[in-house]
Amino acid sequence: MNEEQTGSDDQPVVVDQTDKRSIVPFVAAAVIAIIVLIGIVAGGLLSPAEKNVTEADRLAAAVTNYIDARSRSDLRPPTGVACPGFSEESSGLGEQLGGPKSTVTIDGKGFANATVNGDRAKIDAALVVNGNPVASNWKLTRVDSAWLVCTF
């Protein structure tokens, strides 16, 4: 076992470490990444997300804005989210919302049955009024391209 081996094992092994690696795969990956980024930017410019918003989404946003503004203000209705002359009490909405001092939030069920007829619309909302679930029907009117809570 301790015998020395002679022959080809005595010769040093020459390793050629002069391999040249190509930069082509890295350049190709960078070009592909740039093309993908250009495609994303072009897609965003040609088809903005705002165009993907439905009328039902706009109606839901108007109701949400009304409820949010109502929770931050003592005015009934809050300014900027309802038609001029709108009254919660005469519309029946005040009773659905539990009166002027109630706490109102949107239930996780959200909104349903949105219907639009020209500049008038209706949408059903699942709300929580003073901790109790309440279904309510909202009437909205489009004024200067914005939906406002109104009676009609």
Image: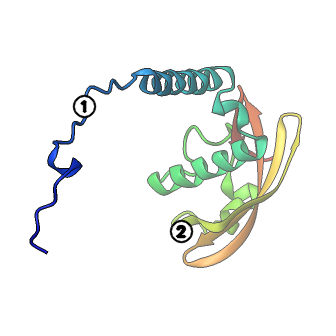
Q: Which mark is residue 133?
A: none
The residue nearer to you, when weighing 50 against 102, is 50
Q: Label 2 to label 1, Cα distance in Å?
A: 80 Å
User: If you read the primary sequence from the N terminus, does the residue marked by circle 2 or circle 1 appear first?
Assistant: 1
**Neighbours of disc 2 within 10 Å: few (<14), some (14-19), many (20+):** some
Q: Which mark is residue 17?
A: 1
The residue nearer to you, when weighing 106 against 2, is 2
- Side of 26 where 100 appears, left or right: right
Let me know if residue 149 appears in the view.
no
**Neighbours of disc 1 within 10 Å: few (<14), some (14-19), many (20+):** few
Give above or below for 127 relative to 16. Answer: below
Q: Which mark is residue 102?
A: 2
- Side of 40 where 140 appears, left or right: right
- The kind of residue tagged 2 is Ser
- The kind of residue tagged 1 is Gln
The image shows residue 74 at horizontal and vertical percentages of 47, 54
Q: Are marks 2 and 1 in contact (CB under 8 Å)?
A: no
- Side of 138 where 100 appears, left or right: left
The residue at 22%/36% (across/down) is 14
Q: How is the image coloured?
A: rainbow
Let me know if residue 26 appears in the view.
yes
Q: Quadrant of the C terminus?
A: top right
Q: Quadrant of the N terminus?
A: bottom left
Give above or below for 57 relative to 128. Answer: above
The residue nearer to you, when weighing 47 against 121, is 47
The image shows residue 25 at horizontal and vertical percentages of 46, 27
Q: Secondary structure at mark 1?
A: loop
Q: Secondary structure at mark 2?
A: loop
The residue at 60%/67% (across/down) is 99
